Image (cartoon, grey):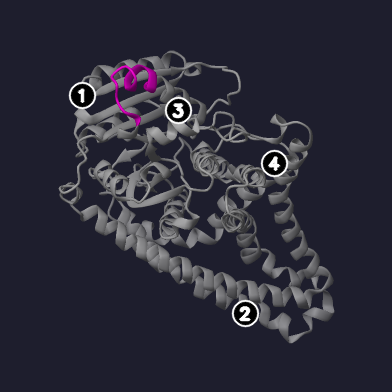
Amino acid sequence: MLYEYSRVGRASELKGKDRKIYRALEIMPGFFTWLTLLGVVLMAWVVPLWAAFFIIVFDIYWLVKTVYLSAHLRVNWKRMRGYLKMDWEKRLQNIKYDHVLQMVILPFYKEGLDVVLATMEKLVESQWPQGKMIIILAYEQRAGEEAEKVVKSVYEKYGNKFMHFLAVKHPDGLEGEMPGKGSNIAYAAEEARKKILDKNNIKYENVLVSAFDIDTRVYPQYFLCLTWHFLTCEKPYRSSFQPVPVYNNNIWDAPAFSRVVAVSGTFWQMIQQERPERLSTFSSHSMSFKTLYEVGYWQKNMVSEDSRIFWNSLLHFNGDYQVVPLSYPVSLDANLAPTFLGTIKNVYKQQRRWSWGVENVPYILFGFLRNKKISLSKKLRFAFVQIEGFWSLATNPLIIFFLGWLPLFLGGQNFNKTLLSYNLPRVTRNLMTLAMLGLIMSAIISMSLLPPMPARKKKYKYLFMVLQWILIPLTIPIFGAIPGVDSQTRLLLGKYMGFWATPKHKKVTSNE
């Protein structure tokens, strides 16, 4: 039976005591973040000596954490490079997999025909047999006639190339739904079940569902790699499967700050792949249709459906659920708008939407309070990972890059006469310089992930791809911490966000 509270989107959907508890849990992440930030400011003013010691200790902690995470990044980089070279079809030779079918759900809103066609072409070029692939093109009724034209063009070109091809129009204004990816793909999956799986007597347990973004382009062996992991993992029907999102479809056209933000996101996912106990589903992911049907598809009344499906499943199966890291990439678009300022705006909005994943924190904690079958140790571990993760996202960069200098400005003359006030900026600078040495590795890894440079680009563009990492002290707080504080503050105040679809823009030159 579907877990009683698995469809909660926000406190306003509950009543009585439950509503008060959920609302308190919504307030908690933002409260901790603002308590930390204001506490550091107050400490720098009232007890600057203590603040200076705290900042030095925090800088050391940041340095150690950077080294620790860099080690995970390097390990996953080597693993991913090895997996890209591996012959996955050969690895499957001694495993029966003829019964496995791939269902790919591609939701789109107002993206152009060129974006959809590029994604479809990569599916055709993949090494998985097209006769064992089901394509669901999920589009929004509210997108109007332009979406209808895109669907018609895509169907005319690719409709007969796969086992099944189904275009599903998601009606606008259905009760209990928020307009967005979650409601779209949940509706599409149910339509696919009725019109394809049930109609053709296809067993749900034989279908692997990949919920992609419309700009997700698979590497040739993605489905072979996915199938191997599905058939060899301990509990295939209690697992989701997570590839590494690499934002390089248009990386050569995106401005430097957008590239740094995009690659930083890839690096974080690579690090998480080496820490599967902390990994949840993100963006493009895969799972068995059997499991998806049992948990009731993706949640329709909230923004972060990609990560929420993991927490839905964890609660539904009483803690017996996991994410299996694939250490194999899929390629997506970096943020690019027609103008530079437009790109800045879109990068910020995208990062804020991703950091709105903080809406999962009250959902998880509320579910843990209600579900008595999950062990206390597992509850504490997941709760700590999520709370600490969102707290670190919003506070650490601001403390490191900005608030660390406050004792010098707020500490007064008595503090500024001390030896510690003289050494504080030097100690902080030296520790940060050591931490920034990790940027060398970041530059090396990022260069190895680049697709071939377009002929229209000049060779010196490679130099910019290396030098772009000097922007990290700006991109981390501006496009990491500040959107995090923004999201948590909105949740704290009950100013709930809706789903924002990242616009897809293709840079056109005179040579194209």
User: Which residue is under mark 1?
Assistant: 161
- The amino acid type found where label 2 is placed reads Arg
Identify the mark at residue 185; answer none if there is no mark.
3
- The amino acid type found where label 3 is placed reads Ile
Distance (Cα) linking label 3 and label 2: 53 Å
Q: Nearer the viewer, mark 3 or mark 2?
A: 3
Q: Which residues are magenta?
A: 192-204
Lower position in the chain sequence, tag 1 or tag 4: 1
Where residue 234 appears, as percent x and y from the top left, is 35, 51
Q: Are marks 1 and 4 in contact (CB under 8 Å)?
A: no
Q: Are marks 3 and 2 in contact (CB under 8 Å)?
A: no
Where residue 313 appears, as percent x and y from the top left, is 50, 41
User: Which residue is under mark 2?
Assistant: 426
User: Which residue is under mark 4?
Assistant: 490
Question: From the viewer's perspective, is 453 left or right of 313?
Answer: left
Closer to the camera, 453 or 481?
481
Which residue corresponds to the image point at 79% horizontal and 68% vertical from the top-left?
43
Figure check: 298 above or below 151: below
- The amino acid type found where label 4 is placed reads Arg
Which residue corresponds to the image point at 62% horizontal and 44% vertical from the top-left?
371
Label 2 residue SS: helix
Residue 43 seen in the current view:
yes
Closer to the camera, 60 or 441?
60
Where residue 172 appears, as percent x and y from the top left, is 53, 17
Crowding at mark 4 (Cα within 10 Å: few <14, some 14-19, many 20+): some
Figure check: 400 above or below 454: below
Q: Is residue 487 magenta?
A: no
